[in-house]
Image (spheres, rainbow, N blue to C red):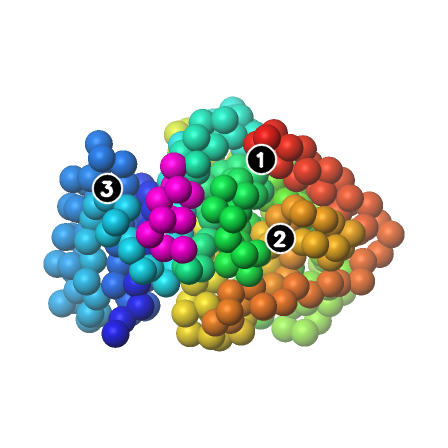
């Protein structure tokens, strides 16, 4: 029997998630949107079914607005919510998207209570915290797609700056999904060579700043809406590690209960994702400077969590 992937939200990210999941033959796919957008969701699902002969994949893909159709899903990826517009911060989105995530949490809790849940909706740190609180799911079952995207951007910008293959860039980004995230140049390598041996301090500082502001950079270019290709692939990478028990170590917004001195907050940290969900959080020994930066981002994450009033 095929696995089942439920995608809550049929917008830009949702439809790309559906295509990637189909191409990777990860399972059957349910693309769920609000009743007013049910027909577009059905149209996208049908379009993807019609692509299958050339895409060379087998999957049953449906569009719906009925949460009963996600029943028994193995993975739920939540992208539902209003996108960030130019001039908006992620925090500006909190009140409207909190209402949406509340409805989503109720539907998932009723029909897919054992699913591995990946939250993409912004403001990410607050939305994954809210989803966790509203569902009451165990911590290994709920995660936010933050660090995976932030680290991908960090690696991409390094490759672009140095003119090297992105496949040879290794590194990680900690903290909240916003302008206070913490790239770690000290632990970043290019083909095994430490970044600080092949890039100047000015280059590294510029790359770190661009990584922190990457989401805003794209929002400004679009004028309306936010990134969709890179978030979709980041979430699919996480889902695939769970479904295939790949034991990938990926930076994700996981619930910390003492790790990095954080208690009861979701924050971007290196996680092992396998068939049991978030199976382990790895702690990195940080320098005093890195620890200070992390404390700053923890404060921001704590504030957004408090604003959910959950």
Q: Quadrant of residue 116?
A: bottom left
Q: Which mark is residue 255?
A: 2
Foreground disc of the pair 2, 1: 1
Q: Which mark is residue 65?
A: 3
| Lower position in the chain sequence, tag 3 or tag 1 | 3
Please state the horizontal and vertical placement of residue 270, each as a whole percent of the image.
Answer: 64, 62
Whole-number angstrom distance, CA of label 3 to CA of label 1: 27 Å
Describe the element under mark 2 as helix, strand or loop: strand
Image position of 140 (left or right of 265): left
Front-lying residue, 30 or 92: 30
Image position of 257 (left or right of 288): left
Front-lying residue, 101 or 300: 101
Whole-number angstrom distance, CA of label 2 to CA of label 1: 15 Å
Q: Which residue is mark 1?
A: 310
Q: Badges 3 and 1: C-beta atoms under 8 Å apart?
A: no
Compared with residue 98, is residue 275 higher up or lower down, i.e. above or below? below
Please state the horizontal and vertical placement of residue 139, each as a whole percent of the image.
Answer: 57, 56
Q: Which residues are magenta?
A: 103-113
In reply to whether residue 73 is colored magenta, the answer given is no
Describe the element under mark 1 as helix, strand or loop: loop
Image position of 67 (left or right of 116): left
């Amino acid at each position: 029997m095929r696995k089942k992937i439920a995608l809550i939200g049929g917008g830009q990210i949702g439809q790309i998630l559906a295509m990637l999941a189909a191409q990777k033959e990860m399972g059957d796919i349910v693309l769920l949107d609000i009743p007013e957008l049910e027909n577009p969701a059905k149209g996208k699902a049908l379009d993807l079914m019609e692509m299958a002969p050339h895409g060379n994949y087998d999957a049953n893909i449906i569009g719906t607005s009925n949460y009963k159709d996600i029943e028994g899903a193995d993975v739920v990826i939540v992208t539902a919510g209003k996108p960030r517009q130019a001039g908006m911060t992620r925090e500006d989105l909190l009140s409207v998207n909190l209402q949406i995530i509340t409805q989503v949490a109720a539907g998932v809790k009723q029909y897919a209570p054992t699913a591995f849940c990946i939250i993409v909706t912004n403001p990410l740190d607050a939305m994954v915290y809210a989803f966790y609180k509203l569902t009451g799911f165990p911590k290994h079952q709920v995660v936010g797609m933050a660090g995976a995207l932030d680290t991908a951007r960090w690696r991409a910008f390094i490759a672009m700056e140095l003119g090297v293959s992105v496949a040879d860039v290794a590194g990680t980004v900690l903290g909240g999904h916003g302008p206070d995230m913490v790239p770690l140049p000290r632990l970043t390598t290019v083909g095994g060579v430490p970044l600080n041996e092949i890039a100047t301090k000015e280059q590294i500082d510029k790359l770190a700043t661009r990584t922190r502001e990457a989401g805003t950079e794209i929002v400004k270019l679009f004028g309306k809406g936010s990134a969709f290709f890179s978030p979709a692939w980041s979430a699919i990478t996480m889902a695939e590690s769970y479904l295939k028990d790949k034991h990938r170590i990926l930076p994700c917004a996981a619930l910390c209960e003492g790790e990095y001195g954080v208690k009861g907050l979701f924050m971007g940290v290196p996680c092992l994702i396998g068939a049991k969900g978030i199976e382990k959080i790895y702690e990195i020994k940080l320098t005093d400077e890195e620890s200070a930066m992390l404390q700053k981002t923890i404060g921001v994450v704590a504030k957004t969590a408090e604003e959910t009033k959950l």
